[in-house]
Image (cartoon, rainbow, N blue to C red):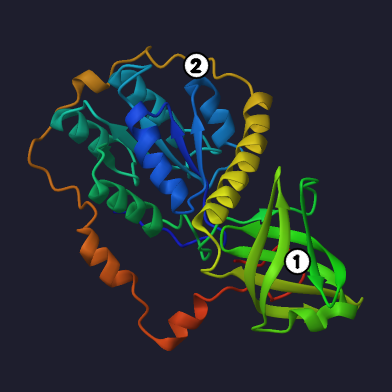
Amino acid sequence: MESRENPLFGRKVFFINPSFLAEKYLIEYLRKNEYEVYILRDYRKSKNVLAVYPDSMCFIDIDAELSYSEWFNFMKSFSESTSLCNIYLGILTQKAGWEDKDKFLMNLRLPGGFNSVSKEEKFFKNFAAILDLNGAKGRRKYLRLDTRNEKDVSGYLTAQNKLYSINVKDISSAGFAITYNQDFSILFQKNTLIRNLCISVGRKAMVCSCIVFNTQIDSQGLAMSVLMLTNENPESTRIFIRNYIFQKFESKMATVISSVDFDSASYSLTDEYSKLVAVRYRDYGELPPIEEIEELSEPDSAEDVKKSEPEHIEDFTDDEIL
C-alpha cells in the first residue's frame, strides 16, 4: 500500500458517484470522524473539479453510470494529465468480482485500492486507515472553519456583571479560537474554566463550557485565545458544529463545481479492459489488519506525543491547528 508524506492540513477526499450504501454508511462514518469528504455526483464534472485540488484523494464507485471498461479508461486518463496525475485514486464496488479487481489493480495506479463496500465497522476502520496512511488528516485532528468572514458566527461572555463581545476566529467540534481586546485578557488566562461562553453558530445559540488552552497577545494589543470544549457540553453541541462546518464546506465546493466545465471526452472509444488477462490468486500487498496499523500509529516517545498537541498558539496566521 502506497504511503505519502502527510500534508499539514490533510487532503480533501472525494467520492465520485457513490452508491446509497457508501453514502449512508461509509461517508457518514468518515464525516463523524473529521475527514474532509465531498461527493461528486456527475463524473463529467469531476476531473475539472479535481484539477483544482491536485493533491486530493478520489474514490470512484464503478458499479453505475459507466461500464467497467469505460471506468478503466476514465481512470487511466488521470495518469496522462499533468493536473490529475497526482490524484490519489481508489475504487469502491459492491458487484465487481476478482477478475475485475485484478484487472484494475494490475493495470492502473490505485493507491486507494479496490474496496468492496459493506456496512461492517471493520470495513469503515480499514478504509479510514487507508486514508490515514496517506495523509488525509495531516497533522490535525478536527476540521476547522475560518469564521472571520462568516456573518452568522459570533460570541460573547458575561463576567463581573459585564457583557464582553468576542470575535470567533475559527471553530471546530473541539473548540474555538477567539480574538478580543487585550484589556480583558485576564478573563482568559491559561487553564481557566469558563462555563458561560455564548456562541451563536448559524441559527443556534449555545452556552458552552470551555477551558482556556492558551492565550497570546500581539504587538498591536490584540489578544487571541484557544478554548477547548469540556465534557460538560452535550454531544449535540459538537454534532451541530461539525454539521455546520460541513454545510459551509459543501456550499463552497458547490460553487467550484458549478464553475467548471463538463468533461466532453468519450471513454468508450477503446476497450483495452476486455483484453486484459486476470490472475486469480495474486498478492497485491494490501493493507495489513487494522490491529497492526493501530500498533504502528501509537506514539513511540514523549517527543511524538508533544508533536501531536494542538499548535493553535504559534502566531496569528492561518497556520494554527486545533
Instruction: Spot the residue most to the front.
Output: 161
- Report the front residue among 211 and 301: 211
Q: Residue at x 51, y 78 (%)?
A: 307
In the image, 242 versus 230, the foreground residue is 230
- Residue holding disc 1: 178
Query: The C terminus appears in which quarter of the rendering?
Result: bottom right
What residue is shown at x 54% (from left), y 36% (from top)?
Answer: 50
The residue closer to the viewer here, 98 or 63, is 63
Question: Along the polypeptide, which appears first: circle 2 or circle 1?
Answer: 1
| Image x and y of residue 38, in percent | 51, 38
Q: Quadrant of residue 278?
A: top left
Which residue is depicted at the point 29% across and 43% down?
113
Q: Tell me the SS state at disc 2.
A: loop
Count neighbours of disc 2 (C-alpha within 10 A) and say few if under 14, some if 14 to 19, many if 20 or more.
few
Q: Is residue 22 left or right of residue 8?
A: left
Task: Give residue 275's position: percent from left, percent from top.
Answer: 20, 20
Q: Where 70 sits versus 193, above or below?
A: above
Q: Amino acid at mark 1?
A: Ile
| Residue 300 image-quadrant placement | bottom left
Q: Which residue in the protein does label 2 denote?
A: 265
The number of callouts visible is 2
- Where is residue 259 drawn, in percent x and y? 68, 26
The residue drawn where x is 45% and y is 50% is: 32
Disc ID at residue 73: none
Q: Is residue 27 left or right of residue 117?
A: right
User: Does residue 312 appear in this view?
Assistant: no
